[in-house]
Image: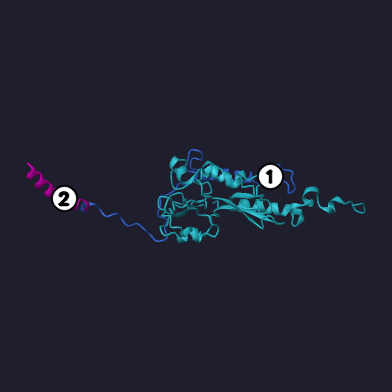
Chain colours: A cyan, B blue
Amino acid sequence: MARMKFLCDAERCIECNGCVTACKNTNEVPWGVNRRRVVTIDDGLPGERSISVACMHCSDAPCMAVCPVDCFYKSTDGVVLHDKDLCIGCGYCFYACPFGAPQFPQDGGFGLRGKMDKCTFCAGGPEPDGSEAEFRKYGENRLAQGKLPSCAEMCSTKALLGGDGDVIADIYRTRVLVRGKGSDVWGWGTAYGKPEKQAAPGGKS
Amino acid sequence: MKRMLVIVMAAALPLGFLAGCGQERAPQVYKQGKYQGKPDTPPWENEQFKGSQTAWDDAIKRRAQGQNEYVRIGDAPGGSL
């Protein structure tokens, strides 16, 4: 049984926001709601790192635990989803989530806070798969088409991986072992080979 | 005639008040900590996968390997996996 997860490789993320755009476009997310965003640490300084953040589809999700109307459920493949028809927009899930994943449309008057919206791992929601109602409320259901979330599939550097946790962990592990560490990851060694391979034994360097 | 109408309306008024009394009480199904919303179908319950979870799993695994450039490129360092 697949356990769907996201994994973002901070060494590869170039802060292009392609994942954010892909999500917005695929699911037609309204203004003011960002299901996914790119966070940069030490922006502008040497060694800055970026990471793409959305709902991490926690195995033991705090949003599910605090919801007073119990509108959350976990799908058979481990995706945390919710029923918007039940949501009362109280915002408890937003306070509980360590990733700031739950979003609330606030485009009405008098401080209106609408029903919660969050990343669905492109798995739609509790409406008939591929229906107009599902798309309107939750966005596209790509999983039912045998596809992975558009943010991960659209990522130009493949920094953002999405899919079964075991599979993407294997992909990431191989990548880390191949690229090495330190300057090998990003610098001269990656582009032109490691110094010990360049210099012939006893020859000029 | 007018008096007759008033009498009929006066007689009908209690019926209006009592109209809701015949309504059956909604069954209380709420269980603390249990999902209360609509049931969802698994992603393989459609025409494409025809209810085959194995076919869906294979499709997702194949798709996931599209994110692995060491498989896509083949002769890259690390070899084909």
Q: Is residue A194 left or right of residue B67?
A: right
Q: Which residue is mark 2?
A: B15
* Amino acid type at mark 1: Val
Q: Is residue B51 left or right of residue A45?
A: left
Q: Residue at x 79, y 51 (%)?
A: A188
Q: Is B9 contained in the magenta span? A: yes
What is the magenta segment's predominant secondary structure?
Answer: helix
Front residue of B33/B18: it is B18
Q: Is residue A57 above or below residue A143?
A: below
Q: Which of the 4 quarters of the picture holds residue A196?
A: bottom right
Front residue of A36/A40: it is A40
Q: Chain of mark 1?
A: B
The segment highlighted magenta reads B1-20
* Amino acid type at mark 2: Leu
Front residue of A10/A181: it is A10
Q: Residue at x 65, y 44 (%)?
A: A156
Query: Circle 2 — which element?
Result: helix
Disc 2 crowd rating (10 Å Cα; few below 14, some 14-19, many 20+) is few
Cα separation, mark 1 vs mark 2, equals 76 Å
Q: Specify the label residue B71 is tagged with.
A: 1
User: Percent position (x, y) of residue B56?
Assistant: 54, 44
Q: Is A192 contained in the magenta span? A: no
User: Percent position (x, y) of residue A159?
Assistant: 65, 50
Disc 1 crowd rating (10 Å Cα; few below 14, some 14-19, many 20+) is some
- In primary-sequence order, the first of circles 1 and 2 is 2
User: Percent position (x, y) of residue A11?
Assistant: 69, 53
Q: Which of the 4 quarters of the picture holds residue A133?
A: top left
